[in-house]
Image (tube, helix red, strand yellow):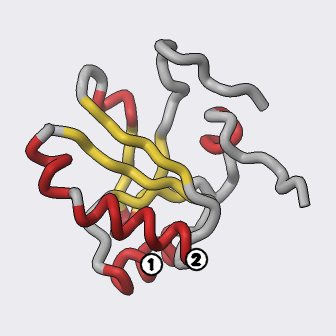
Amino acid sequence: MSQIAENTPAPALTIPTDGNGHFDLSAHKGQKVVVYFYPKADTPGCTTEGLDFSALSAQFAAARTTVIGISRDTVAKLDRFKAKHDLKIILGSDENGTVTEAWGVWIMKKL
């Protein structure tokens, strides 16, 4: 696992999303995109993140910025998570771990 160095291009990112969607980062080249990763949908910290990003969704839209949260959950679980909390952001499914590994964000807990 390696981390992405500052001011370097992001690794490829093409994943399925909630609502049977699809997100391809290359389609957003030259645009602002916030990509955040979380370990598991519907846990306390992850829910807080999703709610906070959703509460700011109008400001992100006004700034022409797309927000996508990515976890290793299935699309079906993301659909339930989004509906349960009325989230206003894109949720991406990296079920096989390809993206989290490429972006260097999947690590083993130390405890």
Residue at 72% across, 46% down: 106
SS label for mark 1:
helix
Q: Position of residue 60 (x, y in %)?
A: 19, 47
Q: Between marks 1 and 2, how big is the CA–CA gap?
A: 10 Å
**11 vs 54: above or below:** above
Q: Neighbour class for label 1 at 10 Å: few (<14), some, many (≥20)?
A: some
Single out the residue that lies furthest toward the top: 7
Quadrant of the rendering where the N terminus is positioned: top right
Residue at 14% across, 48% down: 61
Label 1 belongs to which residue?
81
Single out the residue that lies furthest toward the left: 62
Single out the residue that lies furthest toward the right: 111
Residue at 53% across, 58% down: 93
Of residues 89 and 57, which is closer to you in this image? 57
In which image quadrant can residue 105 be found?
top right
> Identity of the amino acid at label 1?
Phe
**49 vs 8: above or below:** below
Which of discs 1 and 2 lies nearer the camera? The answer is 2
> Identity of the amino acid at label 2?
Thr
Q: Mark number for residue 43? A: 2
| Badge 1 or badge 2: first in the primary sequence | 2
Q: How many marks?
A: 2
Q: Position of residue 4 (x, y in %)?
A: 61, 23
Of residues 105 and 59, which is closer to you in this image? 59
Q: Position of residue 41 (x, y in %)?
A: 55, 72
Q: Position of residue 55 (x, y in %)?
A: 24, 65
Quadrant of the rendering where the C terminus is positioned: bottom right
Q: In this image, 29 relative to 70: left or right?
A: left
Q: Neighbour class for label 2 at 10 Å: few (<14), some, many (≥20)?
A: few
Q: In this image, 75 relative to 40: left or right?
A: left
